[in-house]
Amino acid sequence: MEANNAAERDWSSLAPELLNLIAKKLTEVFDFVRFRAVCTAWRFSTPITCRSPQFPWILDKRGHPYEPHMLFYSITSSKMYTIHAPQFSGRRLLGTSQGYMLTDLCDHASSQTTRQLSLLNPLNNHEILLPASDFCLDAYWIGPQQYQIGEYVVCFAYAGDGCHRSAFCCLGQDKWCEFESDDDGFFQCFHIKSMFFRLEEDTGVTEVTDLTTSTLAYVLPPFEDYKVGANYYAVDALGDILIVFQHFDSSDDSSDDWFTVHRLDLSGGSSPRWVKVNNIGNKALFIDQDSGFALEANEFSRVKANCIYLINTYCLVKRIDIETGEQELLHCPFEESPRWFVPNLEQLQAQ
């Protein structure tokens, strides 16, 4: 009798509050999509905006223009996903952030110097056209943080025509804003929260420019124990601005690299500075050669707090404990420039 009652139960009549609780447990985006596809009642009770935070996928970032099929790998489910995205055909992937990809049309046979850049979301096929540009995208790129897609802003840096240049554009605007460095020194740069950070590699001094006013906001003194030649990664860590340095031990090629984390401290008022930390609380950092971001570890069953999830230059995926330095190698099926990608069903909107 109980089996018959269960078979006849109308699952579509579950309370919306219960459906929302279930939906927020689905940290794989395709599980969330399948859940909403069960019936009309479940779909209307669980709008896209109520989904849980999504665990990042690993994107197969190939060095040639994309074919229509894109490959992703999920560490949590050990599954490979293939997404058909015809709008990526013939395009080059420049960077990723917030579920979008910065691309340009790779038409090397064309004599035109103007580039068509756009933001593309492979999950919902939403595209945001960016202002046309004549940037030399084949020039030498500055630093590992080549492209940044922040909240409503796209920013990147490159070197060409004998000078270093940086450019940014706000979504909804019809032009790029471009500015140059004042000297010929080598520097690396990134932008977070509409602030442009320019790190002078020789000295470790960081100049911070407010993109909204194009004025110098402040100058940060060198990092503690700063050394020239270390890789660095910038992360907007859920309210904190962090820099992760990857140091190398040239005396032992078999040893693991070690990492130090510095937080931007603005509590000093007119004297902001970088402060070295060994605990970032409940956060986990995800960094690769293009970008960095943070997640709340307690929102995922298989994410460890106070850790760095790194895709390094050798296409290895590692989990590094910030406090102890312990490292664990994670499986990655891709061998050519994989990158983190956070699946997102929502559409990015201009201001």
Image (tube, grey):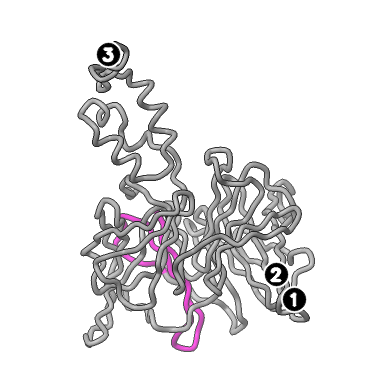
Which numbered marker is on residue 5?
Answer: 3
- Hey, what amino acid is under mark 1? Asp
Say if 176 sits above or below 304 in the image.
below
Q: Main secondary structure of the magenta part?
A: strand
Quadrant location, the N terminus? top left
The residue nearer to you, when weighing 207 against 11, is 11
Q: Nearer the viewer, mark 1 or mark 3?
A: 3
Q: Which span of residues is magenta-colored? A: 152-177
- Hey, what amino acid is under mark 2? Asp
Q: Residue at x 21, y 85 (%)?
A: 110
Residue 268 percent location from the top left of the image: 74, 49
Q: Residues within 10 Å of mark 1 (few under 14, many from 20)?
A: few
Q: Residue at x 29, y 62 (%)?
A: 174
Which numbered marker is on residue 257?
Answer: 2
Disc nearer the start of the sequence (3/2): 3
Disc nearer the start of the sequence (1/3): 3
**Secondary element at image label 2:** loop
The answer to which quarter of the image holds residue 64 is bottom left
Provide the residue designation for mark 1: 249
Is 169 covered by the magenta stretch? yes
Q: Residues within 10 Å of mark 3 (few under 14, many from 20)?
A: few
Disc nearer the start of the sequence (1/2): 1
